[in-house]
Amino acid sequence: MITPALLVWAREQAGLSLAAAARRLKQPRERLSTWESGDARPTMKQARELGKLYGQALGTLYLDAPPDEPALPPDYRGRDAQEPY
C-alpha cells in the first residue's frame, strides 16, 4: 500500500500545494486530502500519475519513510558578505 506520509513528502519535495497538485491532476482537492490522510487510496493509475507529477519513482511512494537525501553542495555562485574575494 502507498504510504500516506510519503504522498505528503513527495508533494512538498515537488514544491506543490495540495490545491496546485489537485488542479494539475484534475482531481478534487478533497480526494488528494483523503489519500494523504490515509482515509482512501489512489488506484495504480492515479499513483503513477502522482509519481510522475511529483518527480518520484512509483516505488518511492511505497517506502515506510522518506529516503535519505544527500546534503546539497555549497553554492559558490553568490558572494558571501563575510567572505572577501
Image (spheres, grey):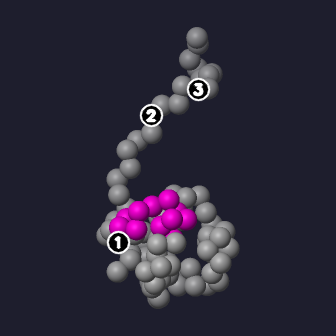
Determine the secondary structure under disc 3.
loop
The circle drawn on residue 40 is none
Rendered location of residue 20, percent (x, y): 66, 68
Magenta highlight on residue 58: yes
> Which residue is located at x 46 percent, y 76 percent?
47
Residue under pointer 2 = 73
Other-residue count near label 3 (Cα within 10 Å), few / some / many at <14 / 14–19 / ≥20: few
Q: Is 83 left, or right, of 19 in this rendering?
A: left
Q: Taking the image as drawn, is residue 19 in sight?
A: no
Determine the secondary structure under disc 1.
helix
Does residue 56 lie above or below 64 as drawn? above
Precedes in sequence: disc 2 or disc 1: 1
The circle drawn on residue 62 is 1
Q: Taking the image as drawn, is residue 74 in sight?
A: yes
The answer to which quarter of the image holds residue 19 is: bottom right
The residue lying furthest to the bottom in this view is 39
Q: Is 1 left, or right, of 34 in this rendering?
A: left
Q: Give the camera-side residue of 84 and 57.
A: 57
The circle drawn on residue 77 is 3
> Which residue is located at x 55 percent, y 58 percent?
14
Magenta highlight on residue 51: yes
Does residue 28 lie above or below 76 as drawn? below
> Which residues are the magenta region?
50-60
Q: Amino acid at mark 3?
A: Arg
Determine the secondary structure under disc 2.
loop
